[in-house]
Amino acid sequence: MAVPAIPEGLDPALAARFEAIRKQFVAGLAARQRDIDAAPDREALDAALHRLAGAAGGYGYGELGQLARQALQAGDASALAASLAHLRQTIDRLAG
Amino acid sequence: MEAFKRVMCVEDDPDIQMILEFSLHRLGGYELCLCSSGQEALDKVAEFRPQLVLLDVMMPEMSGPQTLVRFRAMNVMRTVPVVFLTAKAMRDEVEALLEHGATGIIVKPFDPVALPQDIRIYWQHGRASHS
């Protein structure tokens, strides 16, 4: 997944601020993965995925948000496991 | 006529709070009150007197719709536009949220560059409907 572009037309100070909070978001992905792994039930899992889906796109990581939405919509255990594995790979790549 | 400047955001996710602060305060120039829960918003609303509220739907303890009901019971919040933030955009869910008395819906993820203008439109719409 490519590093998302900073929104066009920002002055340098704002672009630097956006880059700083984008890095902070990426630094928090490992904790989000832990929340997903530790979810005791489907309700807690869905809440963690829902928060990730809502946040990722704002930082330009639309594909990551889409993977979280796919996991939310997974209809059975095997589809959910596949979606979560794909999501984990993506988070590992971004956070690594 | 008072200029539009005070926005309250009620959102429990710290990453979304950060992007809201960037979008609405740094880009949009609004005076912002960030709250992490519905109860915190209820506690701060009388002092901050928001001209518009962005309200997350799914929050622990007190949901967005529950918070909106409590807002509408307060004189100071009776006509203030409230826009729900939601990662779900199913048509029936959107209709249900609007029936709660929301002015509109913004779907997460939102475009941080476009959001300041988007909420201005909702503020204008809310003001027009109560004038």
Image (tube, coloured by chain):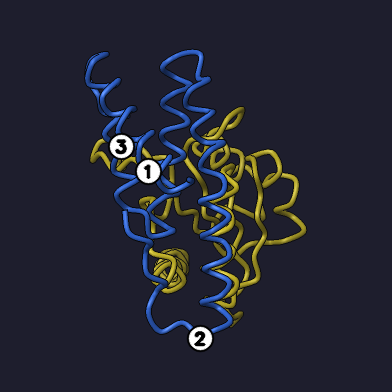
Residue toward you, A14 or A95: A95
For chain B, the rendered hue is yellow
- Label disc, if present, on residue B87 of the rendered structure: 1
Horizontal side of A92 relative to A23 (left or right) equals left
Residue B114 coordinates in the image, percent (x, y): 39, 71
Separation of residues labelled 1 and 3 (CA atoms): 9 Å
Mark 3 and mark 2 in contact? Answer it, CB < 8 Å.
no
Q: Secondary structure at mark 3?
A: helix
Q: Are marks 1 and 2 on the same chain?
A: no
In the image, residue B12 above or below residue A25? above
Q: Which residue is mark 3?
A: A69
x then y, percent, for residue B41: 67, 47
Q: Chain of mark 2?
A: A
Choose the circle earlier in sequence order: 3 or 2: 2
Residue B106 at least partly seen? no
Dot 3: within a 10 Å radius of its alpha carbon, few (fewer than 14), some, or many (20 or more) residues?
many
- State left or right for residue A72 relative to residue B28: left
The blue one among the chains is: A
Question: Which of the labelled discs sits on residue B75, or is there none?
Answer: none
Q: Secondary structure at mark 1?
A: loop
Q: Amino acid at mark 2?
A: Asp
Give the residue drawn at x 56%, y 61%: A21
Neighbour class for label 2 at 10 Å: few (<14), some, many (≥20)?
few
Residue at image x 48%, y 23%?
A37
Which residue in the structure is indicated by mark 2? A11
From the image, state whether disc 1 or disc 2 is nearer to you.
2
